[in-house]
Image (cartoon, rainbow, N blue to C red):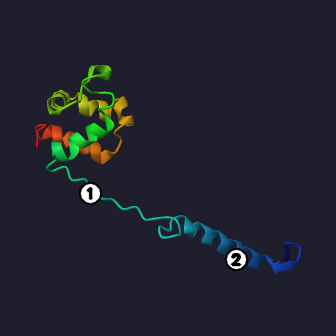
Amino acid sequence: MKIPFHGIITIPFRGFVWLLLIIVVGLLSCENDQYAVGIAPEIKLSCDTNKVSFKDFIKPIIDERCKTCHNNTSQYGGVNLDGYENIKINSVSGKLYNSIRFGNMSNYISDDCDIAKIKAWRNQGSKNN
């Protein structure tokens, strides 16, 4: 049996099935190709939480993402994160981590590594280092 192919070429049914199978397999094989044009392979970098420094990590992230609303002048929600002592109070009480991890502050700090470092800093004693 022959099947018309676009009305111009006729090919045997068996040939049509093989052609269709090759096209389908070819299209599906590109779906998972990490090195296809425009798709970069995902690179996971480690998140080192062994020695999290207040000066090098905690203060910069709080200054960048939190202090606009939580400072000496504007203490949104009654939270002041201006300076080490205020940040430490909120860290030790659990407010800082819990509001970032489980509350509405996750909109501002959503990176899993940043959250893990904030938790590690608290677990390491919230030191001014």
Residue plotted at (34% across, 29% down):
103
The residue tagged 1 is: 46
Question: Which is nearer the eye, 109 or 16?
Answer: 109
Badge 2, how many Cα within 10 Å: few under 14, some, many 20+?
few
Residue 18 bears which disc, if any?
A: 2
Instruction: Classify mark 2: helix, strand or loop.
Output: helix
Quadrant location of the C terminus in the rendered image: top left
- Circle 1 or circle 2, nearest the eye: 1
Outermost residue toward the top?
78
Q: CA distance from mark 1 to mark 2?
A: 46 Å
Residue at 30% of width from left, 30% of height from top? 99
Q: Residue shown at 14%/49% (left/top)?
A: 51
The residue positioned farthest toward the front in the image shown: 73
Secondary structure of residue under mark 1: loop
Residue 34 pos. (x, y %): 47, 67
Q: Mark 1 touching mark 2, by CB under 8 A?
A: no
- Left or right, 16 with respect to 21, comes to right
Which one is in front, 83 or 100? 83
Amino acid type, mark 2: Trp
| Residue 43 coordinates in the image, percent (x, y) | 36, 62
Q: Amino acid at mark 1?
A: Ser
How packed mark 1 is, by other alpha carbons closer than 10 Å (few <14, some 14-19, many 20 or more), is: few
* Picture quarter with the N terminus: bottom right
Percent coordinates x, y for residue 116 in the rendering: 25, 44
